[in-house]
């Protein structure tokens, strides 16, 4: 089987190379936004979706109109148009929202699908129109390099090298299964009663971050002192993100190596962390408390935890099963009784029917594992339908779908 894997390294460019990379990223952003505007105008006029080939044929005209578009490599601009087409396809297939314009300073990047060279022995890489550039060679690169994506994060430039290689069909070394209940007081509680303490990376740096954000707000925007203060704020955000990534990679690697099957809640993190402000006519309730909860949820990185678990288990021959999360902490694992009264506090579970007691998060993990077994065995959704219950799930109202560009693409 073929395995695609990315190896990311920090680049060490010279001053001229940094300026060129900023210009290349800006040109890539401009092309993406221009293609987005054309697609919107074309849809408003009743036209069909413009594919990559037709859009790429307009690049020569754009270069005549904007001379500075001739400076960056043509392939990086073409890749920007491919990214635009992929963003619309994800929207049409309901995998993502409607594509939004790229903003300066956010996600600055460009990609080379060919023309690059990698010299691992001397820790350097050759990039078109940039020349040779050294990088921090922290590990070996496995497989054949297919493309290089150059990106900027926290004032530093990085190269992500995507490789492809043939590997044998993985066979899991472990044979046991585990269920995982995600939370805030405990980051992850396993069905064997062990648990992982939360890192709370953002919470640890929140006070320091607010201090530097206040300093930045008192500076004249775009002044030299404002840019200095902005870099300090960026450095804190980078440190928060790096600590969270390191934490998640270590925990997911440990779990994937020691288990052949992992059952996890199918959490809709985006819906769970929505604001409760409401509107001026219908304001929300407990807005401050919900804001704090949203901040705590996003600080955990549940979606990234699940994403890493999925591909790491696949690499080791294991399997990840996502099951419905409803009633997992209210269902008794001993008798199957479901009641809101079973969970008396955030941590205490005591079944009102049979008297079974345990930590509520452990009970949730046990029920998640049981649902995972049912899904793996017979494809059930693991919802526990057919069991006696005193709580009926609330009905879900569906709003009428708006007419979007999805219809235009298939017109």
Image (cartoon, grey):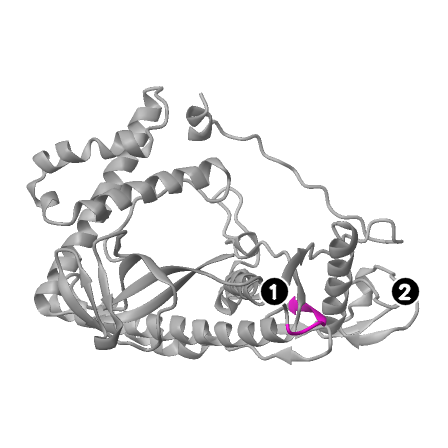
The vertical placement of 84 against 122, above or below, is above
Q: Which residues are magenta?
A: 173-181
Using the image as rendered, state which of residue 275 and residue 89 is in the foreground. 89
- Residue 299 position within the rendered picture, expressed as x and y whole percent measured from the top left: 48, 68
Can you tell which quarter of the image residue 243 is in? bottom left
Q: Which numbered marker is on residue 335?
A: 2
Residue 187 appears in the picture as rendered: no
- Residue 204 position within the rendered picture, expressed as x and y whole percent measured from the top left: 44, 79
- Which of the two labelled residues, at mark 2 and mark 1, occupies the earlier sequence position? 1
Tell me if 58 is positioned left or right of 101 in this view: left
Please identify the quadrant where the C terminus is shown: top left
Write down the residue under mark 1: 317
The vertical placement of 86 against 274, above or below, is above
- Element assignment for label 2: loop
The vertical placement of 409 against 292, above or below, is above
Q: Residue at x 57, y 56 (%)?
A: 272
């Amino acid at each position: 089987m073929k395995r695609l894997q990315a190896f990311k390294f920090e680049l060490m460019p010279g001053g001229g190379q940094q300026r060129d990379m900023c210009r290349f990223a800006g040109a890539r952003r401009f092309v993406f936004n221009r293609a987005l505007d054309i697609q919107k105008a074309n849809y408003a006029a009743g036209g069909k979706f413009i594919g990559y080939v037709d859009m790429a044929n307009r690049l020569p005209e754009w270069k005549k109109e904007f001379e500075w578009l001739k400076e960056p490599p043509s392939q990086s601009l073409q890749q920007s148009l491919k990214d635009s087409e992929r963003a619309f396809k994800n929207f049409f297939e309901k995998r993502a929202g409607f594509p939004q314009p790229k903003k300066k300073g956010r996600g600055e990047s460009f990609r080379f699908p060919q023309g690059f060279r990698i010299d691992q022995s001397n820790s350097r890489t050759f990039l078109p129109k940039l020349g040779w550039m050294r990088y921090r060679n922290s590990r070996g690169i496995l497989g054949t390099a297919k493309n290089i994506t150059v990106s900027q994060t926290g004032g530093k430039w990085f190269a992500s090298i995507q490789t492809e290689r043939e590997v044998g069909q993985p066979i899991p070394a472990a044979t046991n299964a585990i269920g995982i209940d995600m939370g805030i007081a405990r980051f992850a509680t396993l069905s064997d009663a062990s648990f992982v303490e939360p890192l709370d990376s953002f919470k640890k740096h929140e006070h320091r971050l607010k201090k530097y954000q206040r300093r930045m707000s008192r500076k004249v925007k775009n002044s030299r002192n404002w840019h200095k203060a902005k870099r300090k704020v960026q450095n804190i955000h980078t440190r928060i993100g790096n600590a969270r990534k390191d934490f998640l990679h270590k925990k997911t690697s440990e779990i994937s190596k020691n288990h052949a099957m992992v059952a996890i809640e199918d959490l809709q993190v985006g819906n769970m962390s929505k604001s409760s402000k409401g509107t001026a006519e219908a304001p929300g309730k407990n807005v401050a408390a919900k804001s704090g909860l949203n901040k705590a949820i996003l600080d955990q990185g549940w979606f990234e935890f699940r994403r890493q678990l999925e591909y790491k288990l696949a690499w080791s021959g294991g399997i990840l099963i996502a099951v419905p999360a409803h009633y997992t902490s209210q269902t008794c694992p001993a008798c199957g009784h479901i009641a809101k009264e079973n969970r008396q506090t955030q941590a205490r579970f005591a079944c009102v029917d049979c008297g079974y007691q345990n930590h509520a998060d452990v009970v949730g993990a046990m029920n998640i594992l049981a649902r995972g077994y049912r899904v793996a065995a017979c494809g059930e959704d693991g919802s526990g339908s057919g069991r006696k219950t005193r709580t009926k799930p609330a009905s879900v109202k569906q709003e009428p779908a708006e007419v979007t560009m999805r219809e235009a693409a298939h017109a």
